Image: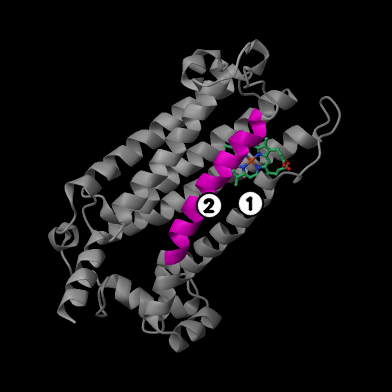
């Protein structure tokens, strides 16, 4: 979408862009230096950011290994074409992870760099997800061994909802913060308080990210339905100590369980990294004072 004439003429019609560029006052105005931006962050939050990146990279490796166990990646057979779907979706999630924490990453030289990484990350994630979705539709519709129904699972319905929210966030973000502001959107922005749009953006980001996590977990569960993960057939007595049977769970299932854990723990680390822990202590002090 090219920048509109309005956005090229100046930014006075987009108060949020002014705020983001530092010409307006506000809680996120870029007048604050990097040092100010990062004071108050506990070591646990810094550690969580590092862990989030590490865990998401491990999850990508696990997804690749899992795809290898399930027959590998190719567009030549239904099974192999399908395997692109989890791999590309997990890569999209890993890129989203960097985007989510981009404004908190200490090695970003300036806020505008953080902004670039943030937006580019969401864009690259969208491209990866598109390839992942083409793969699953292709594997169902190419008729390699007959046809497979589409959009029948809970996973696919939740996934479609997350994709719609995601696209909304991407388009609104580009029109609001990057200067690709069409005239009609400028008019809406003029009538809306800047903090309203920012609040919606800050709220929807984690919703889309956690929704992606939930979709991946449901997707893994959906695929595991077609694999024999249970060891009920070898049980001769009640299974009171299931951890003793850890090795009886097939290796391919253990890998997908660990992949799911990696995705879940990555999300947990991102939530910890983004959470405003000082808010609790402010409320506590206010309550004590009143
Ligand atoms: C954010 C991540 C994901 C999104 C948004 C997503 C979305 C979708 C969508 C929209 C479909 C329907 C396509 C069709 O019916 O042809 C689908 C199908 C499927 N996906 Fe995913 N997916 C994601 C990740 C995963 C992962 C990690 C797996 C793990 C194997 C997976 C497994 C499946 C399976 C088995 C189907 C076929 C069931 C069906 O079509 O309803 N998905 N996915």
Contact? badges 1 and 2 (CB < 8 Å)? yes
Instruction: Tell me the residue at 51%/37% (across/down).
Output: 90
- Foreground residue, 17 or 47? 47
Q: In what quadrant of the picture does the C terminus appear?
A: bottom left
Q: Residue at x 31, y 50 (%)?
A: 272
Instruction: Point out which mark residue 288 bears.
Output: none
Q: Quadrant of ligand 1?
A: top right
Q: Position of residue 176 (x, y in %)?
A: 44, 72
* Residue 288 drawn in magenta: no
Residues shaded magenta: 203-224
Q: Is mark 1 within 8 Å of ligand 1?
A: yes
> In the drawing, does residue 58 fall left or right of residue 73?
left
**Is 166 placed left or right of 46 in the picture?**
right
| Extreme residue in the right direction | 146
Mark 2 residue CB less than 8 A from any atom of ligand 1: yes
The picture quadrant where one finds residue 269 is: top left
Of 263 and 174, which appears nearest the observer? 263
Residue located at (77% from left, 43% from top): 150
Looking at the image, is 254 positioned above or below residue 33? above
Q: Secondary structure at mark 2?
A: helix
Q: Which residue is mark 1?
A: 158
């Amino acid at each position: 979408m090219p920048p509109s004439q309005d956005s090229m003429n100046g930014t006075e019609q987009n108060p949020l862009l002014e705020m983001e560029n530092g010409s307006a006052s506000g809680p996120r105005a870029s007048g604050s230096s990097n040092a100010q931006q990062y004071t108050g962050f506990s070591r646990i939050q810094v550690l969580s950011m590092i862990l989030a990146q590490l865990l998401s990279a491990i999850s990508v490796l696990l997804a690749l290994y899992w795809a290898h166990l399930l027959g590998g990646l190719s567009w030549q057979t239904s099974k192999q074409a399908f395997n692109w779907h989890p791999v590309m979706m997990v890569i999209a999630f890993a890129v989203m992870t960097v985007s989510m924490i981009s404004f908190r990453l200490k090695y970003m030289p300036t806020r505008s760099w953080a902004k670039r990484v943030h937006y580019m990350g969401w864009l690259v994630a969208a491209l990866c997800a598109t390839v992942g979705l083409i793969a699953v539709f292709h594997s169902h519709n190419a008729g390699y061994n007959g046809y497979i129904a589409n959009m029948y699972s809970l996973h696919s319905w939740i996934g479609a909802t997350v994709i719609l929210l995601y696209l909304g966030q991407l388009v609104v973000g580009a029109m609001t913060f990057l200067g690709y502001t069409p005239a009609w959107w400028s008019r809406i922005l003029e009538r809306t308080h800047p903090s309203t749009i920012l609040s919606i953006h800050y709220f929807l980001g984690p919703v889309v990210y956690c929704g992606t996590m939930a979709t991946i977990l449901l997707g893994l569960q959906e695929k595991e339905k077609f694999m024999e993960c249970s060891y009920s057939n070898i049980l001769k007595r009640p299974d009171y100590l299931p951890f003793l049977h850890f090795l009886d769970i097939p290796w391919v299932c253990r890998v997908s369980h660990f992949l799911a854990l990696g995705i879940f723990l990555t999300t947990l680390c991102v939530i910890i990294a983004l959470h405003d822990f000082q808010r609790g202590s402010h409320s506590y002090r206010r309550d004590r004072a009143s």
